[in-house]
Image (spheres, coloured by chain):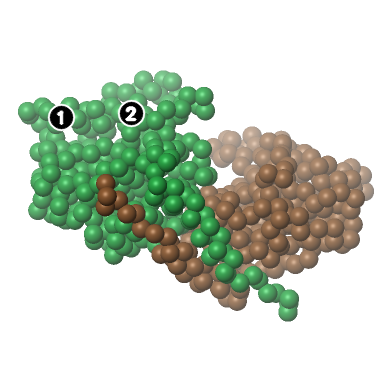
Chain colours: A brown, B green
Amino acid sequence: MTYCVGMLLDAGIVCLSDSRTNAGVDHINSFRKLNVFERPGERVMVLMTAGNLAITQAIVTMLNERLSSTEGTSLWSVPNLFEAARHVGDTIRDVHRRDAESLQAFGIDFSASLILAGQIRGERPRLFNIYAAGNFIEATPETPYFQIGESKYGKPIIDRVITRGTSLDEATKCALISMDSTIRSNLSVGLPLDLALIRTDECRIARHRSIESQDPYFSIVRSEWGQALRDAFNALPNPDWSRD
Amino acid sequence: MTYCVGMLLDAGIVCLSDSRTNAGVDHINSFRKLNVFERPGERVMVLMTAGNLAITQAIVTMLNERLSSTEGTSLWSVPNLFEAARHVGDTIRDVHRRDAESLQAFGIDFSASLILAGQIRGERPRLFNIYAAGNFIEATPETPYFQIGESKYGKPIIDRVITRGTSLDEATKCALISMDSTIRSNLSVGLPLDLALIRTDECRIARHRSIESQDPYFSIVRSEWGQALRDAFNALPNPDWSRD
């Protein structure tokens, strides 16, 4: 399983993914699910993937191959993020044409869900959720984030905290709390984490960090958030229905 | 959709369910999903249901019919909660025998998931999760609660707070917070709520309350928990990776 979240804020973009993939509990590996495409100062894109690893790896590999090909569209040649999302969608459809039938013969669904976030010089930062069919939706001011994979455990805290005005640091904190809640509830989501931050109009990665279990700040989040939550819980009054 | 949670504590039992059922967004109704079987002082059982409404209603109706029949097993005649869970499981299998094939003809799964909680004089309070196949599991000291239906959004707060030693009032507060988080994240879970409390060794319902949107305490939970969560979030330090 996978959990990835991408947040689009006035201040920039926060992308966080886990790296656990498993084909059954006895075959657990770590794979990067957060891919960076960057020409510092001109364009930066972060692509996070969930779903069948063979499929998502094929998609990312084909996207990388197209970067180095001289003809045809690539993430280096697209003029804006919308065209980048279309290019990723077309690549998903190419993989589908190649693999879907064979997968079906083995009863395997063609499952893939992607988050594309970034900025190309000349337009604002943008955030897309791209589906297995190659179609996609873009985040609006009312939806400052997208999640893919095991998204439910970590959703309430984001809904309570994140707005477009949230700072990058606070959004990072929220993403890590959301990930911690997910890891606690689903063993198939696991460390290390990949974190990427983009500041609006820099068109480059401001921070790309791999977070291991001994990461000092994530350790603080893991230990202190649980206690903070219990303290908040205890501060809330108990029901007083004695007058019923 | 449905969300029900049953908690088994040293102090007793907390059962909370929503009452929203929908067959498509244009056909939304409220149905009770929390059923009480009580002979005060001798036995008390709470049965909560999730899944296909026609199936779960048939199960509850057959359980009620068997209460008034003179021969055969019923929830009045079973000697303990384990036998009560078996009786509910057998009733599910009777409904399955009658309906499953016809449902399959329409491509409808036989979906039903139940929580049975209660106490029969002479044994301790017990909590069971009963599946569509009629088999079931019982809560152990390590698992003080079961959820059915849309369980993920409301799970983290329970995992952080609930132990067997939690008081009935605190567990009620936690169940309502868990329900609030679920309602905020899934429109198909909705008010009114059904709450039932049982105190250990009373073998009766200590409180059975229908919670509407204007319920004073639930309104406090809804308004104050969000703020308490944001305060706890703000109190947690932001990442300081400036030294990287």
Q: Residue furthest left?
A: B70
Q: Chain of mark 1?
A: B
Residue closest to the eye, B143 or B230? B230
Residue A208: image tag: none
> Is residue B220 visible to the viewer in this orientation of the structure?
yes
Residue displayed at 92% across by 48% down: A70
Structural crowding at the residue carrying mark 2, measured as other residues with C-alpha within 10 Å and reported as few (<14), some (14–19) or many (≥20):
many
Q: Chain of mark 2?
A: B
Q: Amino acid at mark 1?
A: Arg
In the image, residue B56 above or below residue A155 = above
Asked whether, in this view, residue A80 is left or right of residue B161, the answer is right
Residue displayed at 44% across by 52% down: B221
Asked whether, in this view, residue B54 is left or right of residue B37, the answer is right
Return the x and y of residue A76 as percentages of the image width and height: 87, 51
In the image, residue B243 above or below residue A208 = below
Q: Amino acid at mark 2?
A: Ile
Residue under label 1: B66
Asked whether, in this view, residue B238 is left or right of residue A65, the answer is left
Return the x and y of residue B183 as percentages of the image width and height: 48, 43
Residue under label 2: B55
Q: Residue furthest front?
A: A243
Q: Earlier in the sequence, mark 1 or mark 2?
A: 2
Q: Secondary structure at mark 1?
A: helix
Q: Secondary structure at mark 2?
A: helix
**Mark 1 in CB contact with mark 2 (< 8 angstroms):** no
> Is residue A98 visible to the viewer in this orientation of the structure?
no
Q: Residue furthest right?
A: A70
